[in-house]
Amino acid sequence: MSKQATDFQKKEMSKMYRGRGIFKPLNTGWIDEHVACVREWVANVFFYRKGDTTLMIDAGYNYARLEEKMGWLGIRPQEIQHILITHQDTDHVGAVEADSPGLFRQAKLYVGEIENRYLTGETRRRVMFHLYKLPQVTIRNEKVLLTDGQILEIGGVQVECFLVPGHTWGHMVYLVDEKYLFTGDTLWFGPDGGYSFISALAEDNRLAVKSLAALEERLQQRGLSPLFLTGHTGWTDNFAFAFAHKDKKCSSFRRYADPAAPYDAYEEADDTEERAKGGFLKGVGR
């Protein structure tokens, strides 16, 4: 179903969200010497490289240009043996769904045990304020099921898992080497700071807001101030900016006056190989 769902989103969500200033994806490029991003229309697909290990964080859409854009970064699909999945929405797992081109058939997937209930059919994903039920996602890769607070070591990289339910029931964020927090669809960055992610796409908005506040507290208690990397907006190293509006959610119906946001983020003509090789990608809230 990933190809059908991908094509549907590109067409219908482009119409729904154009001009609202909501989607602000990074272009393809490196953020620093360890973290790279591939832009797939509105989605950020991240890679973390350390020594001989390259982790992929989320697998984006069923997107025809993924291998091409990975090549701009000097990353080959064959290198990817481990993929961290924040949640199972098609724009985060399309490249590993059963009907995908199969670039990552050999990769092991890491997914929360609660989130995995969508994949087994025990739970159905609902969006648009629970009015619309999404098709079940089918993935055949080997999976490692994760729990809240679990710490993994993958090829010399430390990965800590934080459960942040709300957008989906089992959404995970990943703290990598205590320096980088890959937040999936937990955080949305507006021009004035971070909010809980888009309201119409959440299983439970109240729970999402509560989870975001709990995430802030966990980081504060440990004195951690990582780079925050989001699934559909940018990145920041400004802790206060990231949690500036943690008690509010991004409204699907509001227009956000943000000159940095493209009119239609599904148009990606400005995402080029030349730009991908032109220097590090800038953060927000700095």
Image (cartoon, rainbow, N blue to C red):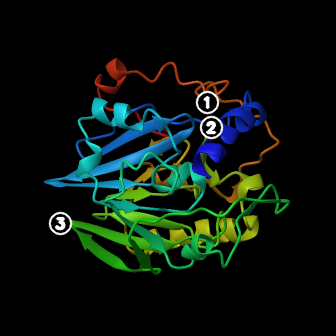
As drawn, the residue found furthest toward the left would be 51
Q: Which residue is mark 3?
A: 156
Q: Earlier in the sequence, mark 2 or mark 1?
A: 2
Image coordinates for residue 35, horizontal then vertical, percent: 31, 46
The three-letter amino acid code for the residue at tag 1 is: Ala
> Which label is found at residue 23?
2
Along the line of sight, the residue nearer the viewer: 121 or 131: 121
Q: Earlier in the sequence, mark 1 or mark 3?
A: 3
Q: Is any atom of residue 281 visible in this view?
A: no
- Disc 2 is placed on an element classified as loop
Kindly report the distance in space between the C-alpha atoms of the residues bearing marks 3 and 2: 34 Å
> Which label is found at residue 265?
1
The three-letter amino acid code for the residue at tag 2 is: Phe
Kindly report the distance in space between the C-alpha atoms of the residues bearing marks 2 and 1: 6 Å
Answer left or right for 140 relative to 5: left
Position of residue 36 relative to residue 216, above or below, is above
Along the line of sight, the residue nearer the viewer: 46 or 259: 46
Check whether the beta carbons of the residues at disc 2 and disc 1 lie within 8 A of each other. yes
- Disc 3 is placed on an element classified as loop
Q: Residues within 10 Å of mark 2 (few under 14, many from 20)?
A: many
Q: Residues within 10 Å of mark 3 (few under 14, many from 20)?
A: few
Along the line of sight, the residue nearer the viewer: 73 or 279: 73
- Image point (74%, 64%), residue name: 205
